[in-house]
Image (cartoon, rainbow, N blue to C red):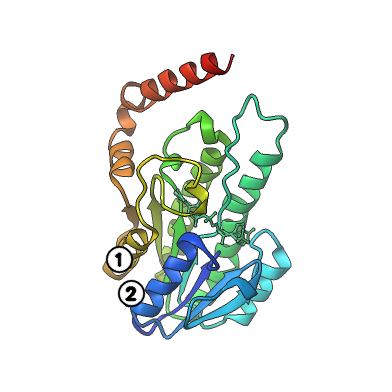
Amino acid sequence: MKIDGSVALVTGANRGLGRAFARELVGRGAAKVYGAARDPAAVSEPGVLPVALDITDPDQVTQAARQCPDVSLLVNNAGVLKYSTFINAPDLDAARAEMETNYFGTLRMCRAFAPVLAANGGGAIVNMLSVTSFYTNPLDASYGASKAAEWSLTNGVRLELHHQGTLVVAVHASFIDTDMAALTDAPKISPESVARQVFDAVEAGQVEVLADERSRFVKASLSRDHELIYPPIEEFWDAAVKGSG
Ligand SMILES: NC(=O)c1ccc[n+]([C@@H]2O[C@H](COP(=O)([O-])OP(=O)(O)OC[C@H]3O[C@@H](n4cnc5c(N)ncnc54)[C@H](OP(=O)(O)O)[C@@H]3O)[C@@H](O)[C@H]2O)c1
C-alpha cells in the first residue's frame, strides 16, 4: 500500500520509536496521522492528531476504533520492558504487565481495528516486535516471552485477515536508541532508521522487517540456536550470577 494519502494510527506516539513512526508518516504524505498515547497532551509532533489511548483498557480501545473510522494503517508500537528474570523476580507482576501490554494490548488493537481496515480497503497492520521474539535472554526474560507471544499473534492475525487483503508486518530489532534501551551501552539503531525500513516494507508489501544485523543473525540461526545463540548468553549469565554472589 502507499503511505501517501493513507490514514495511520500509531500507538505510543508521544515518544521514542512511536514519535519517529508518526514523523516518518507525516513526511511521506499520509493524509492523516493519529498519534495515540496514554497522555494525549504529550503528543507534540507537528501534523499529528492526538488520541487518548491506553491499549490495556478495553473501553479506550473500542472508543479509539469508533473515533478513528478512516484508519487504513495501524502501527502497534506501544510496549513495555521491565527487565525481569523468570526465576529471581520477586513476583509475577512484571511478567503480567509485559504480557498485558505487549501481547493482550496488541491483540485487542488488532481485533478492534480489523473491521475498520476492512472497511477502508484492507490496509496494513505493523506490529513492533523484537529480536527477543526469537530467543530468551535472562536479562529481559519475561519481556521476551511477551514478544514471542506477540510474534505468534502477528502470524495468526496475518492468516485470519488475509481474506480481507490486510498486510500484516512483523518488525524485529535489537536495541533502538530510545528511553527503553537507555540502560545499555550496546550498539543501537536509530528510531528513524527503523521507521524508514518499516514504511518501505509496507509500501513493498513485505511481511517481515529484520531491522538490524543482530535480528538478521538470530533469525538466520534459529535452526542451530543451541549452538549459535544460547552458549554466549549462558557464559555471560553464569559470570554475572557468580559475580553477584
Ligand atoms: N528500544 C528498544 O531497544 C526496542 C527494541 C526492540 C523493540 N522495541 C519495541 O519498540 C516499541 C517502542 O519502544 P520504544 O523503544 O519507543 O520504548 P519507550 O521509549 O519506552 O516508549 C514506549 C511507548 O509505549 C507507550 N506505552 C507503554 N504502555 C502503553 C499502554 N498501555 N498504552 C499505550 N501506550 C503505552 C509509552 O507511553 P508512556 O509515555 O505513557 O509510557 C511510550 O510511548 C515497543 O513495542 C518496544 O517493545 C524497542
Q: Please tell me whether residue 178 is drawn above or below residue 21 in the rendered image.
A: above
Marks 1 and 2 in Cβ contact (< 8 Å) = yes
Q: Nearer the viewer, residue 167 or 60?
A: 60
The C terminus - image quarter: top right
Name the residue rendered at 39%, 75% in the picture.
25
* Residue under the point 57% across and 57% down: 106
In the image: residue 22, left or right of residue 11 = left
User: What's the amino acid at mark 1?
Assistant: Gly
Mark 2, Cα crowd under 10 Å, few <14 / some 14-19 / many 20+, is some
As displayed, is residue 99 above or below residue 9? above
Question: Element under label 1?
Answer: loop
N-term mark: 1 or 2: 2
The residue at 37%/47% (across/down) is: 188
The image quadrant of residue 132 is top left
Q: Which mark is residue 205?
A: 1
Q: Which residue is mark 2?
A: 1
| 227 left or right, relative to 55 | left
Q: Quick one: quadrant of the N terminus? A: bottom left
Q: Relative to residue 84, is residue 3 depicted above or below?
A: below
Residue 60: where, in percent of width, then height? 69, 69
